[in-house]
Image (cartoon, rainbow, N blue to C red):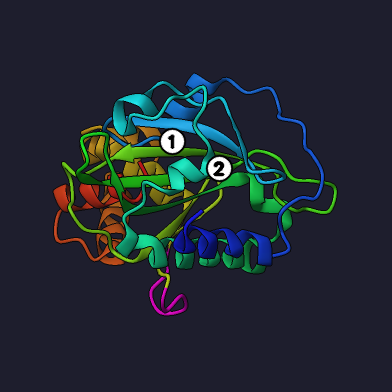
Amino acid sequence: MNLEIEKLNLVWKNSQKTTKQSTLLPQINFEDTVSSIISTGSFYYYIVDFFDMSLSNVSPGIMDMHGLDPETVTFYDILGTIHPDDMEFVAKAEQANLEFLYGTLGKDKLLNYKSSFSFRSKMKCGEYAMLNHQALLLTLDEYGNFGKSLNIHTRIDHLTKTHSNQISFIGLNGLPSYMNMDVYNPLDSTVEFSKRELDILKLIAEGNTNNKIAEFLFISPLTVKKHRTNILRKSSCKNTSQLIRDCILKGLI
């Protein structure tokens, strides 16, 4: 294990939040779960068990993207694909992830949030491409420490060539989302989207007009228009096209 990967590994070890016991994986439908949270683009997924850093349920896409055998790949093989210049950012993002999940959200909400950030990763051709990393905790131990996580890596270099030094937390099951947290200055720029705003965002991405969105949500077109204005303001986007692109990059839609 090289020094940069060891530094990243220490983020989890030193957090004192990794489980010291094996946790049972719940019964989940991988196709439904993965399709509900991936961004557009080629992708692969796997489950990492932080008890012993073992992998399971590795999808075949990892061979297409990295040239790694899904039957024998290790977690450290995947970490080894990260661009050396992005290692510090990934370590900072993981630290911010732990602090926000446990310090701000609390243990009772951990299984209802996915985290999302981007970094450059080495492809099987030897070149680097931008990946969006999304992580969803699947198990906790009896003390609330994290056990198994579903990680999904989606290729997004057709949308962007650079990352923003930000991490986002997308709420599931009706919980609000927290976007654009600067991992180097975590208190400066976090934006919160309500469940209603998230519903409207998804309907916008599907190409619906204000009138159609109003019909779906049983609200007035004027209310939809106000929400759209607030969403653009919060996201600092100039138009709907930029909004949809940014939300895809962050794993929001």
- Which circle's residue, 1 or 2, is located before the other in the chain? 1
Magenta portion: prevailing SS class: loop
User: Which quarter of the rendered picture does the C terminus lie within?
Assistant: top left
Most extreme residue toward the right is 142
Q: Is residue 168 above or below residue 79?
A: below
Q: What percent of the width, then of the height, locates residue 124?
A: 27, 34
Q: What percent of the width, then of the height, locates residue 176?
A: 51, 54
Comparing 42 with 33, the one in front is 42
Q: Categorize mark 1 by other alpha carbons within 10 Å: few (<14), some (14-19), many (20+).
A: some
* Location of mark 1 (residue): 37
Classify mark 1: helix, strand or loop: loop
Q: Quadrant of residue 101?
A: bottom right
Q: Residue at x 57, y 34 (%)?
A: 47
Q: Residue at x 69, y 61 (%)?
A: 106
Q: Residue at x 61, y 45 (%)?
A: 112
- Per the image, is 187 magenta? yes
Comparing 230 with 142, the one in front is 142
- Is residue 74 toward the left or the right of residue 15 in the image? left
Which mark's residue is nearer the viewer, 1 or 2? 2
Q: Please name the amino acid that badge 2 sits on.
A: Leu
The region drawn magenta spans 184-191
Classify mark 2: helix, strand or loop: strand
* Location of mark 2 (residue): 136
Q: Residue at x 34, y 31 (%)?
A: 43
Between marks 1 and 2, how big is the CA–CA gap? 9 Å
- Confirm or deny contact between disc 1 and disc 2 (CB under 8 A): yes
Q: What percent of the width, then of the height, locates residue 208?
A: 23, 34
Q: Is residue 229 above or below residue 28?
A: below
